[in-house]
Amino acid sequence: MVKKNLSIIAVIIVSIIAVLDLSNYGIPPTHDGEYHVIRFQQFYKVLSEGVLYPRWSPDFNNGFGIPLFNYVYPLPNYMAAIFHALGFGFIDSFKLNMATATIAGAIFMYLWAKKYWGDLGGIVSSVFYTFSPYHFLDIYVRGSVGEVWSLGLAPGLFWSYLNFLETRKRFFLILSGIFLALLVLAHNILALVFFGFFVIYAAFLISNGFRKIGKVGDVRDLGLIVFTGLGLAAPFWLPALLETKSVQGLQIFNPIEHFPKLYQLVYSSWGYGFSGIDPANGVNRAGQMSFQIGIANLIAFMGSIVVLFLSRNKKILLFFIVLFLATVFLITPFSIILWKNIPIMAYIQFPWRLLSAVVLITAFLAGALVHAALYKKKKKLQIVIFIALIFSPIALSIGYAKAPFYHKRNDIHYLTRSNFKDGTNSPGNSFNTRWLMGAPKKRKDKIEVLSGSPKIKITEFKSISYSFTIDSKENSKLLINTAYFPGWAAEINEKRTNISENEGRMVLALPSGTNKIRVFLDNTPIQKLSYIYFLASTLILVLYPGVKLIHPPGGLRRHVDFSGA
């Protein structure tokens, strides 16, 4: 059993080496890491109160709350909740998130590349993927836990879909839909990038089909995967996309200010700063952050061009070589006209974010270099190339697999500090509701009396639900010191009533007498629609009968194996 899984074990060991530095006490000084720690705490707080899909962060914004989780990718938050439930702190949950995602990515890249380049080629691709400089930039510089998860899941989607086309097993169709959903839940921006790559890759496989099953059926099944995958993730992306007008500050970056210089893609110093124009002084922060593709990755790309001329089947190599060139073009200033004129590209924010796709492409191509030696039936040469390719990315990038230092802090440091908890937890005042002008001042009481003289007795107080009783001899009006947002609702004696807005807060008019009041965050119509889409997708996947395989497994090898077997 151990011998059978030796390659997987080797891949896991190498990936553990890549994230071993995260075992240090404290938190590395990354761009986003401290944001995530306090977000994890807020998400867990609401989740532990029985809300299966938290959308509100109750303590941010000086206690007025913001709909943060209605717009921010939830997968890392759920993973952190699992880790925290197991006894880990939120800082450790942040590091465990990135370690788990990195290991998952190494395994999935191995499984996917192995389908094309064999066992040794799969290992090489996995090592290149794990030890790409940009991968370490995401972990140890940016602390972008969502992007690290995207890198962990993307090769899983490619592997699962490839298996489905080969075997026609219903399991892999369902798994492909789940992978697509997880990719969306991991990071909405990179999901757009990898979704585009997936559709292009799937179209390539269908148009170069290895089975005479009919392309119409393949297109139908791809459509089913896309429909159900997006459906499983609909509770996140549908409200995040269609309810953007209810918040402010979502688009604060101008992509054309963040182009790396061409030489920086080959080599750039390993800084820990930011990219783009410094808003404080208008100076370009070039050189503060590395955008290098990686020397080993570039060698793999150039080597794949040589291998292209040795291959009996050039299609898959040529496809990824062209994909590499197109992606690099989009990263450079040469593509500025596209960034200016295609609105959806502004959503990506930073052109260099496409380096995530470059990492995947070059790592995949690296495995072909080992397989080329097998085509020439030179086993010893293949072993030599394999060893050289394994050690080259590790030797060239191991220096990036660490943080410069660690803040020796625990969770309390972040949970008790005003600068982390009382703002919106995002740059540019992002995710604050559009009705609140500026940061509101803290209020002592959640409920204030605007008119009348009611007696208020709180019976239950939760993150997104307040219950209390009112005794008043006259009509009264209350001010709820929570940010107004569509979805907040109220019941008086279990009957729905209207909530009005005043300076970004909620106002509730009450009749005289004794009244039981409940104010709670309900689902908006769009959120309800997203749950319907989710349930419909779940039912389709459960009830889908599957498709029988017309030709036996093995047809795939005729198109991807250099041996021509």
Image (tube, helix red, strand yellow):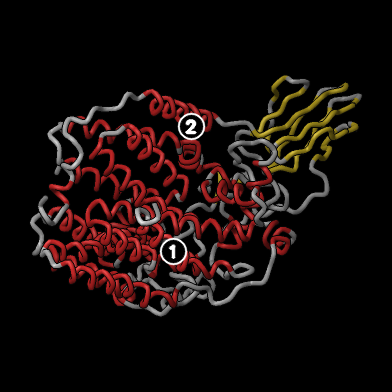
In three-dimensional space, the C-alpha distance between marks 1 and 2, rounded to whole angstroms, equals: 40 Å
On residue 280, the disc is none
Q: Which residue is mark 2?
A: 530
Kind of element beneath mark 1: helix
In the displayed structure image, the side of residue 95 where residue 357 appears, left or right: left
Residue 156 position within the rendered picture, expressed as x and y whole percent measured from the top left:
36, 48
In the displayed structure image, the side of residue 21 where residue 389 appears, left or right: left
> How busy is the neighbourhood of tag 1: few (under 14 within 10 Å), some, or many (20 plus)?
few
Q: Amino acid at mark 2?
A: Ser
Residue at left offset 51%, top offset 75%: 281
N-terminal-most mark, 1 or 2: 1
Is residue 293 in view from this perspective?
yes
Name which quarter of the figure residue 348 lies in: bottom left
Q: From this view, report whether residue 156 is shown above or below residue 404.
A: above
- Choose mark 1 or mark 2, whichever is in front: 1
Residue at left offset 35%, top offset 40%: 176
